[in-house]
Image (spheres, rainbow, N blue to C red):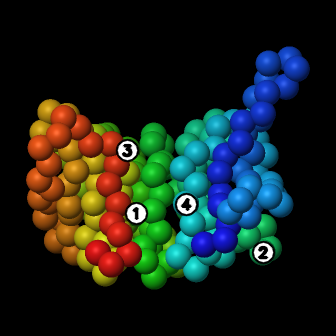
Amino acid sequence: STKIVYVLVRYGSDGSKRYILEVADQDGYNPRPLVNSPEPIMSPTWAPDGRKVAYVSFEKRRASIYSQDLASGQRRLISSFPGINGAPAWSPDGRKMALVLSKSGSPNIYVMDIASGHLKQVTNDFYINTEPAWSPDSKSLLFTSNRSGGPQIYQASVASGSISRISYDGPYNARASYTRDG
């Protein structure tokens, strides 16, 4: 809770862009670059233990998800399937990661066991399913989907894949997350 991670975009005098993934103290002081790339970096997210971050990088001209150890700087490629590789979200115990992949067509939510790389597909349809967020007990995921005609929040059981809409009377939802106490 004493550090922040963010993406900084710097513009060169020739109009070029550099994307820099940085970690800094929570007040913005003592910034330290982790990745510096001419290609976009997005969706940085902390591992629950605060020792790693995951993010999406386009450095190889396609979206890929990496995790990076802050102490050693060691990077690990998590996902680089054809199409979308996005919205990484660590499970509360840090052993799994929810992610959005379009490897079989539409963007769907998957859960990866980080140690083995084994993938489990949680949603399986032609809608846009994105921005997964874990429940504190790791049994379900909240996510945003357009399955009802516009973006709404849904909950999916990780074990069964059963999906239910979270009741909301507003015009749209952009992203959901659980609080620490559920």
**Whole-percent x and y of residue 9?**
72, 36
Q: Residue at x 68, y 66 (%)?
A: 3
Q: Residues within 10 Å of mark 3 (few under 14, many from 20)?
A: some
Under circle 4, the secondary element is strand
Labelled disc at residue 45: 4
The earlier-in-sequence mark between 1 and 4 is 4
The earlier-in-sequence mark between 1 and 2 is 2
The earlier-in-sequence mark between 3 and 2 is 2
Under circle 2, the secondary element is loop
Q: Gap in Å between the C-alphas at discs 2 and 4?
A: 16 Å
* Label 1–label 4 contact, CB within 8 A: no
Which residue is label 1 attached to? 98
Farthest top residue in view:
14
* Label 3–label 4 contact, CB within 8 A: no
**Whole-percent x and y of residue 52?**
64, 70
Give the mark toward the camera: 3 or 1: 1
**What amino acid type is highlighted by mark number 4?**
Thr
Which residue is label 3 attached to? 102
- Quick check: can you spot residue 116? no
Under circle 3, the secondary element is loop
**What amino acid type is highlighted by mark number 2?**
Ala
Give the mark toward the camera: 3 or 2: 2
Report the number of discs: 4
On screen, residue 3 versus residue 152, left or right, reads right
Q: Residue at x 58, y 45 (%)?
A: 42
Which residue is label 2 attached to? 71
- Quick check: can you spot residue 140? yes
